[in-house]
Image (cartoon, rainbow, N blue to C red):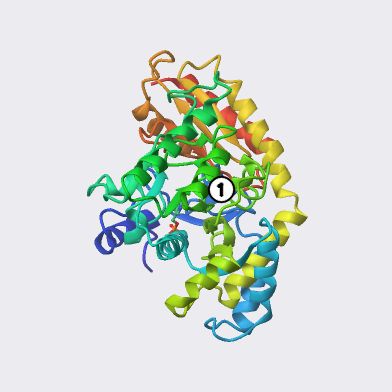
Amino acid sequence: VTAWRPTAERALPKRHHHLPNSHPTYFTNPIAMVRARDCRFYDEHGRSYLDALNNVTLVGHGHPRLVDVAARQLGRLNTNTRFVYDVLSEYAERLTATLPDGLDVVYFVNSGSEANDLALRMSRYLTKRDDVVIIDDAYHGYTTTVADVSPSRYKHYGKPDTTHPTPVPDRYRGRYGYDDPEAGAHYARHVIETFDRLAAEGRPPAAYLFEALLAGGGQVVLPPGYLAPIFAAASRAGAMTIADEVQVGFGRLGEAFWGFQTQGPDVVPDFVTMGKAMGNGFPVAAMVTTREISQAFDATGRFFSTYGGNPVACAVGLELLKVVEEEGLQQNALETGQYLRDVLAALAPKHELIGDVRGQGFYSGVEFVLDRETKEPASEETLLICERLKDRGVLVYPTGPAWNILKLKPPLSFTRDHADEFAAALDAVLEEGW
Ligand code: PMP
C-alpha cells in the first residue's frame, strides 16, 4: 500500500521538470483542484473555494447540460470537420444570430490566439498593408503574429515596427478622468491621430484591434463615446476593425451580448474573435466576419482547421448559448454584477487601500493604492490580499500593468449571496492589516 501524498507534492516536481519555466500557476503554493461545481472549486483536501476569478467558466462549473451533450456527442460522432453534421450548421446559425446583420461567416478554430491571428492575416491580405493600431497593455495571444500586437509580450523582445499602441483610456489614472464627460472623445482623438500620422507617413494601418473592456490594461471600462469616432475614422482610413471578444463576449458585460455593442449601434466590427467562455472550458473558438470579406480572402486557398468546429466543440458551444439564454445569465451579469460592485464600493470608506471599484456586468476591478492622492499602486499588498483570500476560501487574482488590481470574473451564475460572501472575506482580510 502506497501512502497517500498530497497531489501538489507528487505532481509539482514533474510538472516543473516537463513544463517551461515561463508557464505560470496561480498562488505561491499552487492549489491541486480535483473538482468544481457551479461557482465553487474543491481541492484535494476537500476544501471549497468561491470562484471569483474564472476566465473560462461562463455558465458555472460542471454544468450538467454541457456535460451531457459533450459526453453524448463524443460517444456518437467526433471527427474532423470535412464531414457534414447538423450540429455545426445549427451552431453557426445560432451564433451569428447574436451578432449584427452581415456578420454571417464563421471560421471555427481552437483558441483565441488562432482567431486573432486569422483576423490579422485577413486584414493584412485584404488591405495590402502591414501596420496595426492597438490599445496599450493589451494581450491578444501567443502566436508570432498576435504576440507582436501584445505589449505584455513584445515588451520582452522589442516592439515591432508595424505595431502602434495608443493610450489606455483609463479614467482613474489617465489624462481624462471620470469627471470629464468628453473623456471618450478625448481618448479616441489619440487613436485617430495615430491613424492620421501613419497615413501621412505613407503607411496607413491595416487594422485597429481592441477589447471592449481592457483586462491587461487594468480592468478598464471604455468611456462612452470612445469607439464610435474611432470606427468612423478607421472606415475613412480604410483600416479594418477587429473586436477581440475572447474575454468579454457571451453576455458577461450584462448590457449587451457582445462587448463592442456596449459602445452603441454604430460600432460594427469587420471581425469578431471569440474563445474562452465559448465552450465553458472546452476548447471552442471562432472568428466571425462578413461574406464579402470572407469571399475576398478565398483567393488565398482553402481554410481548414482539423479540430476547429468539430462535433463535440459545436455541441458544447450550441448548448452554452441555450443555457445563457434560458437561465437569464446575461441579465444576472447585469444586475448581480452591479450588486457586487456596490457591496465592494461600500467597503471603500473603511479601507483606504481601495482606490477605485469599476467594471461592467460580471467583469470588474478593485484597484488598490497606497495613497489616494498619488495613486501609488499597492502591488505587493494586492498579491498578499489574494493569498489571504485564498486562505479564507475565496479565489481572485491580480491584474493590470502594476498588478495592483483584483480581476473579478466569476461565472455568470454568481448570486448575491456569493457577492456578499466575497465582500465579507475582503473586508476581513483588509481589517487584519499587515
Ligand atoms: N485575447 C484576449 C483578450 C485574451 O485574454 C486571450 C487569452 N488570455 C487571448 C486573446 C488568447 O486566447 P487563447 O489563450 O485561447 O489563445
Residue, far left: 157
- Image coords of residue 217 (percent x, y): 42, 38
Above or below — where is 366 with respect to 41?
Answer: above
Q: Give the amino acid type for the residue marked by disc 1 in the picture.
A: Val
The structure residue drawn at horizontal position 49% and vertical position 36%, both measured from the top left corner, is 219
Q: Which residue is mark 1?
A: 248
- Image coords of residue 86 (percent x, y): 68, 80
- Image coords of residue 310 (percent x, y): 56, 76
Above or below — where is 200 with respect to 74?
Answer: above
Specify the quadrant of the image occupied by residue 405. top left
Q: Is residue 83 visible?
A: yes
Q: Is residue 137 visible?
A: no
Front in this rendered view, residue 262 or 38: 262
* Relative to 154, 306 lies left or right: right
Front in this rendered view, residue 299 or 236: 236
Specify the quadrant of the image occupied by residue 345. top right
Front in this rendered view, residue 249 or 30: 249
Q: Secondary structure at mark 1?
A: loop
* Relative to 112, 345 lies left or right: right
Q: Is mark 1 within 8 Å of ligand 1?
A: yes
Say which quadrant the C terminus sits in: top left
- Image coords of residue 382 (percent x, y): 41, 30
The structure residue drawn at horizontal position 48% and vertical position 67%, both measured from the top left corner, is 110
- Disc 1 residue crowd, few under 14, some 14–19, many 20+, Cα 10 Å: many
Say which quadrant the N terminus sits in: bottom left
The structure residue drawn at horizontal position 46% and vertical position 61%, both measured from the top left corner, is 119
